[in-house]
Image: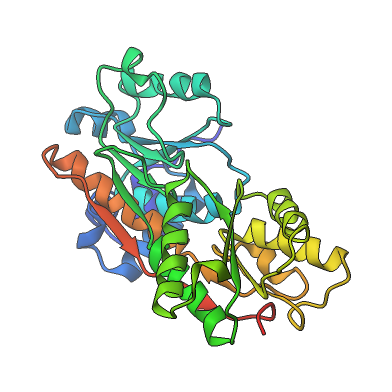
Amino acid sequence: MTNPATIEDVARLAEVSIATVSRAIHYPEKVAKSTRQRVNQAIAITGYTTNAMARSLRMGRSNMILVLAPDISDPNFSSILIGLENEARANGYGVLIGHTQNDAERALEYLKFVSSGQAAGLVLFTGHQPFGHEASVERLPPAVAVFEPVFNSSISFVGVDDQAGGRKAAEHLLAAGHRHIAFIGDSKTRLAYQRRRQGYEAAMDAARIPPQQRTVLAGDGSIESGRLCVEQLFMRDTLPTAFMCVNDATAIGVLNGLTARGYDIPREFSVIGFDDIPQATYVKPALTTIRQPRSTIGKKAISLLLTSLEDSQTPPQEVLILPDLIVRGSVS
């Protein structure tokens, strides 16, 4: 049976001292980036695992962070998770993933990691606090929301500036000459989607587009909801010339609905999405969209969470990152 790797093995492979390996693990900000990369590579090759129990005793808490996500198949999740995990590991923390599948009971099950002291902090992808958490834990640990802000709470949020992104998307369509633009995917329960609509309205107001030239349809952010919105619009007398969609999945549904009816995109209709998921480049035409800086969101979320872990009096913050417009072929 092979003996477990030691810190000496890592130091030997990385060609640094044992003290440097320790600093790279526990205080990465004090180590040069090139040295930190060599140490991390040596850790990966040797399979060395730091003594988490000793570190937890020294710090008086767990060195694990619990991530609650409703849908790990969401293309946005994996990219944000990479940023989360890289930053957590660089600071000596591990990540536990709780896939709730939108099930409140599952979320409460995962909260047992908190009540048993196995998780020090919480990252929420859910857009809400775990339902019924008061009965499971005395109080929630330091937490930060990503991807979706939490309604009416004191939980910090790190994410894209949805309102600025929504405005940028609408302005791109306006600059292309469109005046009757439909907003597809309005929601009363998703704060991020509401902010994207606010950006749409702000751009339309600035361009002095009257209300009768604005069309807003609700949706749940799925491909099917985008397709159904197209069907609803074709029951009306007046059609928009462009579709601003609340996310890329909705936009793909709109593209499917329009092409199924034989329309040429973007010659007859223009479509813009939001998120820049990988599938956005594979549809025809490739989707013009607003890109979320997902890895950066993950890194900043962990940094903010670690600050809260060090100082429980840290006030809640909202960190918004400006998105980029990605121009492809779906807008004319």
* Quarter of the figure with the N terminus: top right
**Residue 128 appears in view:** yes
Would you place residue 89 above or below residue 172 in this image? above
- Where does residue 114 sit, x and y in percent of width and height? 34, 24
Left or right: where does residue 98 sit relative to residue 282?
left
**Residue 12 appears in view:** no
Left or right: where does residue 24 sit relative to residue 9?
left
Q: Residue at x 66, y 49 (%)?
A: 222
- Where does residue 13 sit, x and y in percent of width and height? 42, 58
Could you tell me how many numbered marks the image carries?
0
- Where does residue 288 sit, x and y in percent of width and height? 62, 75
Would you place residue 209 above or below residue 189 in this image? below
Image quadrant where residue 268 sits:
bottom right
Q: Residue at x 41, y 57 (%)?
A: 195
Left or right: where does residue 51 sit relative to residue 259?
left
Identify which residue, 3 or 248, lies in the foreground.
248
Would you place residue 111 above or below residue 221 in this image? above
Left or right: where does residue 176 sit relative to residue 80?
right
Image quadrant where residue 306 sits:
top left
Q: Residue furthest top?
A: 135
Q: Residue at x 38, y 42 (%)?
A: 6
Image quadrant where residue 252 sits:
bottom right
